[in-house]
Image (cartoon, grey):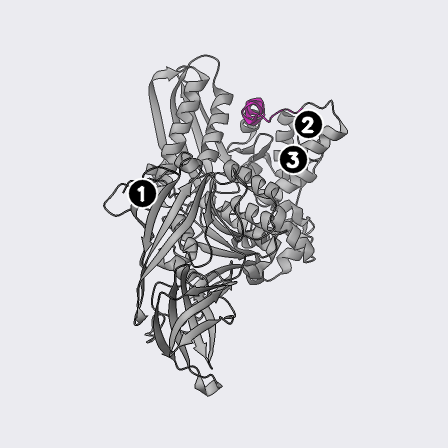
């Protein structure tokens, strides 16, 4: 769960047992860190299914995922991928998995059924295109990002703010926009929540 | 054969759900009969019991005498005798009704068994693929090699194959770990007993979890208003979790409940506590750990052991240098570069979450040393800000030239770049 300091936790950003969270955003939008932030609060071993082979555990360690409980499984074969993730779901309490291009809808739905049966927590990051409707309980899509700290040749990256649109059954079928922040020293934090439904006035 | 295959072959087949509680109830008279001959019967599941016979052998004048006494009360069961529960189980499986199997050379008996007797499907499939088809062949492999390839499930399999029968070392049971409940109103209804069983199992596991240990045996005691006191031991090859304990308590109590008198006392004693030689870490649950290890062994069998990895920190200045990978299950080795040593000029936090193993070329337009725009896919993105250059001197003694690092910020993300010999490479994505 990602929470705001000094406020009640915002339960919308949570990996619930038996549910899938879909993370949508191109590389650079911060969705890997958001996925790691969701994994950080899962007890026990957590696994990352790395399709591209680019996953760097430094980010996970900064987010307070102990190195002894983080396992990385590399699988770039879209035919093998469903079986690998299913194997992880059957015993690992929390899994973050990139989804390679070409995995079939039916396989994803079967994975969803397995997640519900095993009460595993699963975050999926499709590398291209959205997941089929109904697979994910909650969809988090990156809308806008901003970095502080790096100026015109001086300073360094210090803090990122990411605007995320949450949709799906996990937010009661409405869309909500949330701003999260992280600075590489601890978990991702929710800093504000704008309750926005499509076509309605914004609340700050 | 799976259910669908069976139904396809025989459409009129009727599928019944297994009722373990009912099986336990029907098996109870058999257990009582064996207990009348030898005490300390331990149930694994309805139909399978273990009995330590060292004391009974002296009483009955030998193993044949013990077996004859048990045969006289159980009739058409299969009986096996060997050193340790694993070998005894397979001795019983290989026996026939009326023809018990008494194994005198347990090591030779185990060596002839197929690896399928270990039960872990994925690991057994890998053993076969490697040409290891019997427990004897497995026992001849160096244990360190098995541990490296298969982790702790492999070590456990090697121990069993080697005849190291006891999976756990019995420890002195701290008395305060047992739980007991007395009921002012005797429990007469099955539902009341089921509820009490679940609550007591939860209390027991709470206490064990806090102590960082998990049971492989559970002693269930029940007392009724008519003064009857029953006691039964259940054992499991794997550490029991709360659900496993609650199930066994429920099955056993259901087998006993009925007849005159309600239940006035239930007691649960954990036994044969896991003797792994270490305390469980605070976040660790022994039964969950077993499930997790099985899942990871399965993943290894699908993608290969070199693609199921754990990372260790290592000294270095670039993110790719600061991580050392090892196969899951391998023992960690000392880092090549001390991560605790000062590394002046190391890339500061936050670290990029994505680091390409081979930094690809990145198209960047520069204007007098300042990045102006970068090409991401098919689009050019304007640079909103950047930090750098931070110089990397390189390993000049190996012919490496100097390079400059930059953090480049665009509206779609931030990127760690290295410029060397006039060319820009992508070293990380702050995802």
Q: Secondary structure at mark 3?
A: loop
Left or right placement of residue B422 versus residue A187 in this view? right
Quadrant of the rendered image containing residue B342: bottom left
Contact (Cβ within 8 Å) of mark 3 with mark 1: no
Label 1 crowd (10 A; few <14 / some 14-19 / many >=20): some
Label annotation for residue A194: 1
Q: Nearer the viewer, residue B29 or B279?
A: B279
Q: Position of residue B191 (x, y in %)?
A: 44, 19
The residue labelled by disc 3 is B79
Q: Nearer the viewer, residue A75 or B261?
A: A75
Which chain is mark 1 on? A
Disc 3 to disc 1, C-alpha distance: 70 Å
Q: Position of residue B302 (x, y in %)?
A: 61, 53
Q: Does residue B20 belong to the magenta stretch?
A: yes
Quadrant of the rendered image containing residue B137: bottom right
When the figure is inspected, residue A56 is found, relative to residue B85, above or below; the finding is: below
């Amino acid at each position: 769960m990602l929470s705001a300091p000094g406020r009640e936790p915002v339960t919308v950003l949570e990996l619930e047992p038996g549910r899938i969270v879909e993370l949508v955003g191109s590389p650079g939008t911060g969705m890997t860190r958001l996925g790691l932030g969701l994994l950080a609060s899962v007890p026990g071993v957590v696994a990352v299914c790395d399709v591209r082979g680019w996953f760097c555990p430094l980010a996970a360690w900064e987010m307070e995922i102990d190195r002894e409980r983080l396992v990385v499984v590399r699988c770039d074969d879209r035919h093998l991928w469903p079986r690998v993730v299913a194997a992880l779901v059957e015993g690992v309490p929390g899994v973050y998995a990139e989804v390679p291009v070409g995995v079939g809808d039916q396989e994803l739905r079967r994975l969803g059924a397995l997640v519900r049966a095993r009460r595993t927590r699963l975050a999926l990051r499709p590398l291209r295109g959205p997941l089929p409707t109904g697979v994910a309980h909650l969809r988090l899509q990156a809308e806008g990002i901003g970095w502080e700290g790096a100026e015109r040749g001086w300073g360094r990256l210090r803090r990122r703010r990411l605007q995320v649109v949450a949709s799906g059954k996990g937010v009661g079928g409405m869309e909500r926009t949330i701003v999260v922040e992280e600075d590489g020293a601890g978990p991702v934090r929710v800093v504000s929540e704008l309750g926005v439904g499509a076509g309605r006035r914004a609340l700050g | 054969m799976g259910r669908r295959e069976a139904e396809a072959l025989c459409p009129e087949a009727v599928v019944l759900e297994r009722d373990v509680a009912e099986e336990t109830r029907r098996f109870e008279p058999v257990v009582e009969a064996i207990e009348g001959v030898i005490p300390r019967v331990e149930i694994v599941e309805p139909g399978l019991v273990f009995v330590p016979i060292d004391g009974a052998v002296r009483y009955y004048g030998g193993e044949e005498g013990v077996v004859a006494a048990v045969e006289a009360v159980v009739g058409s069961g299969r009986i096996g005798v060997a050193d340790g529960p694993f070998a005894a189980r397979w001795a019983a499986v290989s026996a026939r009704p009326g023809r018990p199997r008494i194994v005198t050379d347990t090591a030779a008996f185990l060596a002839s068994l197929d690896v399928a007797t270990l039960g872990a499907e994925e690991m057994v499939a890998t053993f076969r693929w490697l040409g290891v088809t019997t427990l004897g062949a497995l026992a001849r492999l160096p244990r360190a090699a098995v541990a490296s390839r298969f982790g702790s499930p492999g070590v456990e399999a090697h121990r069993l194959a080697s005849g190291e029968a006891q999976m756990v070392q019995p420890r002195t049971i701290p008395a305060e770990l047992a739980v007991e409940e007395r009921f002012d109103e005797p429990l007469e209804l099955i539902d009341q007993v089921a509820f009490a069983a679940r609550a007591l199992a939860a209390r027991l596991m709470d206490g064990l979890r806090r102590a960082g240990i998990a049971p492989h045996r559970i002693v269930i005691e029940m007392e009724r208003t008519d003064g009857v006191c029953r006691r039964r031991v259940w054992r499991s090859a794997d550490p029991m979790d709360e659900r496993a304990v609650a199930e066994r308590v429920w099955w056993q109590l259901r087998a006993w409940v009925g007849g005159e008198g309600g239940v006035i006392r239930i007691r649960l004693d954990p036994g044969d506590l896991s003797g792994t030689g270490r305390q469980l870490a605070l976040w660790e649950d022994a039964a969950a750990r077993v499930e997790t290890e099985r899942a990871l062994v399965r993943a290894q069998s699908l993608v290969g052991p070199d693609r199921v990895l754990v990372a260790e920190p290592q000294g270095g200045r670039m993110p790719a240098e600061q991580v050392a990978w090892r196969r899951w299950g391998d023992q960690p080795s000392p880092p090549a570069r001390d991560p605790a040593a000062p590394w002046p000029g190391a890339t500061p936090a936050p670290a990029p979450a994505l680091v390409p193993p081979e930094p690809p070329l990145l198209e960047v337009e520069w204007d007098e040393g300042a990045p102006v725009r970068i090409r991401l896919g098919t689009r050019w993105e304007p640079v909103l800000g950047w930090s750098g250059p931070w110089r990397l001197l390189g390993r000049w003694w190996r012919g490496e030239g100097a390079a400059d690092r930059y953090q480049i910020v665009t509206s779609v993300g931030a990127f760690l770049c290295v410029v060397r010999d006039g060319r820009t490479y992508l070293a990380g994505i702050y995802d």
